[in-house]
Amino acid sequence: MSNTGTQNPMEVFQEEAPEVSKAFNGLIESLKNTKGLDAKTKQLVYIGIKAAMGDTTAINFHVPMAKKLGASREEIKDTILITLTVCGLAGVAASLPLALDVYDKTE
């Protein structure tokens, strides 16, 4: 019996589809190495996209990454608030409280 409900979704992906996961990770690495945006800005853009989608799992994992790259609490907040005109209140309501809580708890 699997405990996939309690595992990190990416860990499940890696366990259940290792070849696809490896290819996906290669794509992520390629995107990390592009030169147009710095790493912090890339994380903020990603957080904004995921907030617009209402993807709180991604918010939970990427806010600490952005903070470690130097993103301020205000930058996280603005990144999510800017999605309001794109996705409406649902994404902001789902993502903003979580993002700020995760930010405040991340060392």
Image: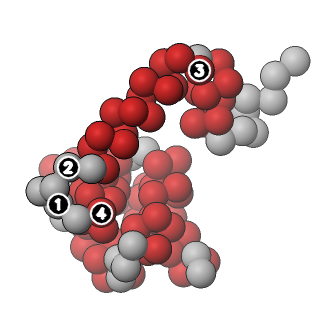
| Residue 77 occupies quadrant | bottom left
Do labels 2 and 1 touch, CB within 8 Å? yes
Can residue 43 be seen here? The reply is yes
Q: Residue furthest right?
A: 1
Q: Position of residue 106 (x, y in %)?
A: 58, 76
> Marks 1 and 4, Cα distance to the nearest angstrom?
7 Å
- N-terminal-most mark, 3 or 2: 3
User: What amino acid is labelled 3 in the image?
Assistant: Pro
Q: Which residue is mark 4?
A: 39
Q: Which residue is mark 1?
A: 37
Do labels 1 and 4 touch, CB within 8 Å? yes
Foreground of the two, 77 or 15: 15
Q: Secondary structure at mark 3?
A: helix
Q: Secondary structure at mark 4?
A: helix
Q: For the N terminus, which image quadrant?
A: top right
Can residue 89 be seen here? The reply is no
Q: Position of residue 90 (x, y in %)?
A: 34, 51
Q: Is residue 72 above or below residue 98?
A: below
> Marks 2 and 1, Cα distance to the nearest angstrom?
7 Å
Foreground of the two, 67 or 99: 67
Q: Which residue is mark 2?
A: 34
Classed neighbour count for the residue bearing mark 1: other residues with Cα under 10 Å, few (<14), some (14–19), many (≥20): few
Do labels 1 and 3 touch, CB within 8 Å? no
Q: Which residue is mark 3?
A: 18
